[in-house]
Image (cartoon, rainbow, N blue to C red):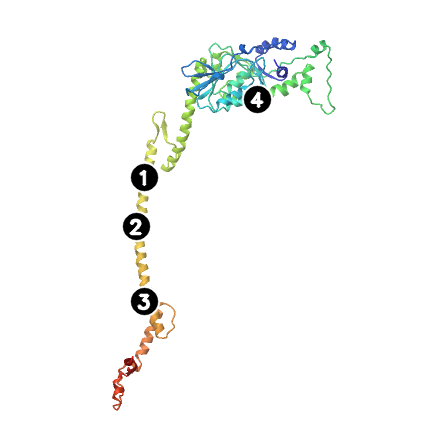
Amino acid sequence: MSINNLHSLLNGRWFIHESYGHSLLPSLNNILKGNSLKIEKEDKKPESFVVQLGKSPVVASTFSNSDNNNDYVLVMDLKNPIYKYSQECGPQGTKSKINILERYKTDPYCKGIVLDIDSGGGQVAGTPEFYDYIREYTKPVVAYTDGLMCSAAYYIGSASAYIVANKRADHIGSIGTMIYFIDFTGWYEKEGAKVITEYATKSTEKNRDYEELIKGNPEPYIKNQLDPITEDFINDIKKVRSTVNEEVFTGKTYSAADSITMGLVDEIGTLQTAIDKVFELSKKSSNQNLNTDMSKQLVNVQAVLGLDAPLASTEDNGSYLNAEQLETVENRLVELDASNSALQTELDAALANTEAQEQLTASQGVVTGIEASIDGMLTSAGLDVTGTLTEKATALSAKVAEMGGKDGSNHTNPKVDVNNEAAAANVVGGVDISGAMNN
């Protein structure tokens, strides 16, 4: 194990089942004594597999879907103590597992994830973050256990959409928080070291809970450190497992059968049950997306039909109009027919008005021509009259009457000089036309 990761084992709080935690102490003791726990690469087991329908599992790191284009499920193991960071001599940390799952998000052939869990828990650090990631994952995630699914392991698995437990599973639950605190003072002194700790004058609260713990007073540490973490743990479980029995929050563990009763798991089954469930949830998710689009269209249809309530529907027949809605639509059609008749009447009237408008325009043209003629006559008569057409016509009539009353209205016989017959011959009607004739 890298010395850089040793601090993650010796520092911090744990979501861990007690017996599982005790089983890790011999390894920790060997590390402190300088004994190597290095594991050869060939002894390491792959932590994720790809399972296609009707085919054998394939190690995820060697799998390529480019040739066959078949749908598959990624099975990721959580079968070791849970750490935030990967251990050189141990399992991948939650950070590394998140990075792996991130790569499968955009693969359309990956239908979802199975978390194959056999772990008694692990560090607090990194566990809530992994929980959040699983809960918000865009593909279906199903958790499965045939061994331990305790504390941090249950915390993570609870974020799945569904939990399957093998009927022979060992322990499920252990919802709670603890600290494995080791006072190394004696060990340091045995090695010849003396530990001296001092704080600045103003640092009165710095590490106070920890110092009280060393002195044998654990209450402040429990109240200020462990209790808030446990409350978050419990609240997160309630968010995703709304039917869980309150009794499970005492930290107790349960068998697979009892876990069903307590609301910790959803079904007794095998790993294949979990894989099949992912395919099922993926199909439902696709149908839900389709139904969402159809629902939006149905809302528009309902608005057009004037319906207050949604269309009735069944899984077999789809959406349809019930008797009440059908009557509403029929009444609406009658209203629309009456409305259309009224609109047609208005349209016919508008067309009629158009013909009248054309006749009026033609009449206005005639009137304009008459008025222009009268204006011309008034000008010829030397009259300057403005006003309406009636006023102009009255003025013209008065002028005609005036001219009719003068002598020019009667026939006049001209006096002709008998001695000047030539001149007489050039006078017609009292008008001398000699000039005209010469022209």
Which quadrant does the N terminus fall into? top right
Disc 3 crowd rating (10 Å Cα; few below 14, some 14-19, many 20+) is few
Instruction: Determine which residue is flagged by label 4.
Output: 232
**First along the sequence among labels 4 and 1:** 4
Q: Nearer the viewer, mark 1 or mark 3?
A: 3
Q: Nearer the viewer, mark 2 or mark 1?
A: 2
Instruction: Determine which residue is flagged by label 1.
Output: 333
The amino acid sitting under disc 1 is: Leu
How far across and how far down the image is residue 241, in percent?
50, 20
SS under mark 3: helix
Q: Residue furthest front?
A: 438
Image-quadrant location for residue 4:
top right
> Residue 280, can we see it?
yes
- Vertical comparison of 22 with 391: above or below: above
The amino acid sitting under disc 4 is: Asp
How far across and how far down the image is residue 408, in percent?
30, 81
Instruction: Determine which residue is flagged by label 2.
Output: 348
Mark linked to residue 416: none
> Residue 264, can we see it?
no
SS under mark 1: helix
Instruction: Determine which residue is flagged by label 3.
Output: 370
